[in-house]
Image (spheres, rainbow, N blue to C red):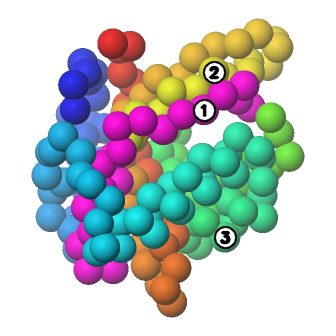
Amino acid sequence: MGRTETCSRRVLLAGVTAGVATGLAAPMLGSGAALAADGTEAVARQLEALRIAIVDGDAKALDALTHPQLSYGHSSGRKIETKTQFIASLAGKTNYKSLAFSEPWFQIVGDNAMVRHVWDGADILPSGETGRSYIAVLQVWLKEGGDWRLLARQSCPLKPA
């Protein structure tokens, strides 16, 4: 993936555990995958829709994009949000001046998708100043009724390249 990762074993274990809980094997490392006809394009569209919904604080879109049993883990490894908590933390707020998801990697396994990416955000802090969030993210998406919805997410801090 071409960057220095500082994930702890606990955070990595949380990502693997999310995969095992949904019947996935441990994620395979790779340099990225081309968008393929296996459903990856649909997952990539959902990932971009999620990024936009986070930036916009769009509660309706966040609700549609996430599974009722969402487990949303933050990069500290100590904060885990339910779907309700995740949406409430973002709804109607502008938390980011900018947010990019780079280095996407996708793997479809049945009705599950593993997604990895780098989150690079210019955060608006409570003081009004700008901070930076630069993290590695692992997501598990579940396809139900033809729609991909975010089931689990865990992240860990990265050192900027």
Residue 90: where, in percent of width, then height?
Answer: 74, 44
What secondary structure is marked by label 1?
strand
Quarter of the C terminus within the rendering: top left
| Observer-nearest of 77 and 142 | 142
What secondary structure is marked by label 3?
helix
Residue at the image position 72 percent from the left and 25 percent from the top = 97
In the picture of the structure, the residue carrying the numbered disc 2 is: 122
Q: Main secondary structure of the magenta part?
A: strand
Q: Are marks 1 and 2 in contact (CB under 8 Å)?
A: yes
Q: Are marks 1 and 3 in contact (CB under 8 Å)?
A: no
Within-10-Å neighbours for mark 2: few <14, some 14–19, many 20+: some
Q: Inspect this view and state whether residue 82 appears.
A: yes
Within-10-Å neighbours for mark 3: few <14, some 14–19, many 20+: some
Residues shaded magenta: 95-116
Quarter of the N terminus within the rendering: top left
Mark 1 to mark 2 CA distance (whole Å): 6 Å
In the picture of the structure, the residue carrying the numbered disc 1 is: 99
- The question of residue 128 being in magenta is answered with no
In the picture of the structure, the residue carrying the numbered disc 3 is: 64
Name the disc covering residue 78, or none.
none
Residue 37: where, in percent of width, then height?
Answer: 31, 73
First in residue order: circle 1 vs circle 3 = 3
Q: Nearer the viewer, mark 1 or mark 3?
A: 1
| Observer-nearest of 76 and 113 | 113
